[in-house]
Amino acid sequence: MSRPNIRYPPKVTPTFKLINDARERLKNTKYKVMVLSGKGGVGKTFVSSMLALALATKGYKVAILDADIHGSSIPTMLGMIGERLYASEAGIEPATGPLGVKVVAINLMLETPDTPVVWRGPLVSKAITELLAKVNWGENDYLIIDLPPGTGDEAITIVQVIRDLDGAIVVTAPSILSEVIVAKAINFVLKNNVRLLGIVENMSYFKCPKSGDIYYLLGKSTGEELARKYGTKLLAKIPLDQYIGEALDKAVPYILAYPDGEAAKALMKLADEVDRMVREGKN
Ligand SMILES: Nc1ncnc2c1ncn2[C@@H]1O[C@H](COP(=O)(O)OP(=O)(O)O)[C@@H](O)[C@H]1O
Ligand SMILES: [Mg+2]
């Protein structure tokens, strides 16, 4: 196995050939779901990586693309240390994450994970298209795509290259449940004719493990109201859970290490709901 023969940073904007190759490569992936938000730090990477694992525990073949080029963090969230992408005759081979989830992230290609990526927009678009086009994705039930905050180059590239996205999930948290920020992400999804599966409200509340009392640490949630206002669903309310940080420190994926945790249960329900909606949307 050798290092992928791929030029980084790439030189030009994506060509039609590259875009077509990407579509061809993803032909045997049944369902494609992107995860986005108007803001950073709300838990997109947490939700997308745990959703991927939750779907894998249901027996699905799952792949995940970390499309956050500047802030690639899916490998860390999945507890993958020292993993790399390698080239084979068939292309770039995804790294194998927990439960056999295929993981593709720019951080798995850099010399060291702390190497900064200092590319401007066109290079970012090219890099994402190139990853989609050159990775040997194989056959999958699901591809989950984790996006950086906002609706910039990465999100635009994904909706343009993957024309058959099965849905989008907008992640938010009570503190940023400012309508304008959530609305930006929702409007981006709708304007690009992607099916909005719904909103996930992360960090909704904290349940004291001793007393069972509930605290709204980031503010009282209004996820239901927002979902109603934008004609969509509140897919899940995921609480704050101290074991998430602990799992990260131990480099183990939270949902596998603490399957009975409050947040883990909410994530499993989210996976059931997303799976149901996506499959019913297709059939
Ligand atoms: N429900 C939660 N409870 C506790 N910590 C959380 C929760 N959701 C996310 N986090 C933590 O918050 C930080 C930001 O989450 P992340 O998924 O990286 O956000 P984003 O991808 O939206 O920028 C991470 O350290 C993550 O582990
Ligand atoms: Mg992230």
Image (spheres, rainbow, N blue to C red):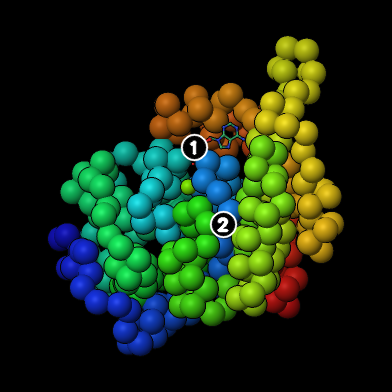
Residue underneath mark 2: 36
Going from N to C along the chain, the mark reached first, 2 or 1, is: 2
Question: Farthest front residue?
Answer: 180
The quarter of the image that holds ligand 1 is: top right
Relative depth, front residue between 60 and 206? 206
Residue underneath mark 1: 253
Q: Badge 2: how crowded within 10 Å, few (<14), some, or many (20+)? A: many
Residue 231 as seen in the image, left or right of residue 148: right
Relative depth, front residue between 62 and 270? 270
From mark 2 to mark 1, how far is it between C-alphas? 20 Å
User: Is the residue marked 1 within 8 Å of ligand 1, measured from its CB?
Assistant: no
Looking at the image, is 254 positioned above or below residue 4?
Answer: above
Q: Position of residue 57 (x, y in %)?
A: 59, 49
Image quarter (top left, top right, bottom left or bottom right) of the C terminus: bottom right
Residue 256 in view (yes/no): no
Picture residue at 23% right of the left edge, 51% below the top: 110
Looking at the image, is 42 positioned above or below residue 101?
Answer: above
